[in-house]
Amino acid sequence: MMGRRIFFTALLLAGAIGGFLGAAPMPAGPLNPFGIVFLALSGVIWFGWSVIPDIYAYHEERARTGRLRVDLIVLRMAPVLTMRSDRGKKPF
């Protein structure tokens, strides 16, 4: 796992260095947007790596339970969706 983390962070850091040195469609400089974006993404990958395996574990668990299981996002939004559908109806 640590090897993947280092590889993807190094890949994004190489993109940031390339962006800052002029390999992007913008001129070289310290405020190159491509360099800044790649640098920020490398930080997200490095510091947020513990979340990535959890995402894969969640999807793998959902795949094992079957297709008829309700997605958590839909389940959490159910009260809002029912309120919206009841908005136009008249009370008893």
Image (cartoon, grey):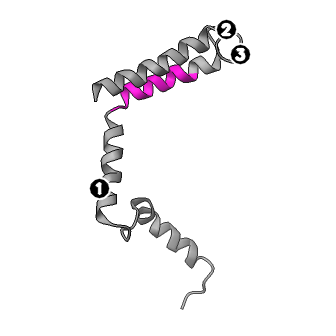
Give x and y (percent) for residue 7.
Answer: 38, 22
Q: Which residue is mark 1?
A: 61
Residue 82 in picture, x, y percent from top left: 50, 74
User: Mark 2 and 3 residues: CB-CB less than 8 Å, in contact?
Assistant: yes
N-term-proximal mark, 1 vs 2: 2
The secondary structure making up most of the magenta span is: helix
For residue 33, above or below residue 74: above
Q: Would you identify the image quadrant in which residue 4 lies?
A: top left
Question: What's under tag 3, amino acid-wise?
Answer: Met
| Image location of residue 88, percent across then percent down | 63, 79
Residue placed under numbered mark 3 in the picture: 26
Quarter of the figure with residue 24: top right
Q: What's the magenta region?
A: 37-49
Q: Which amino acid type is marked by label 1?
A: Glu
In the structure shown, which secondary structural element does the residue marked by tag 2 occupy? loop
Out of 23 and 29, give the one closest to the viewer: 23
Query: If the image is split into quadrants, where does the C terminus sit?
Result: bottom right
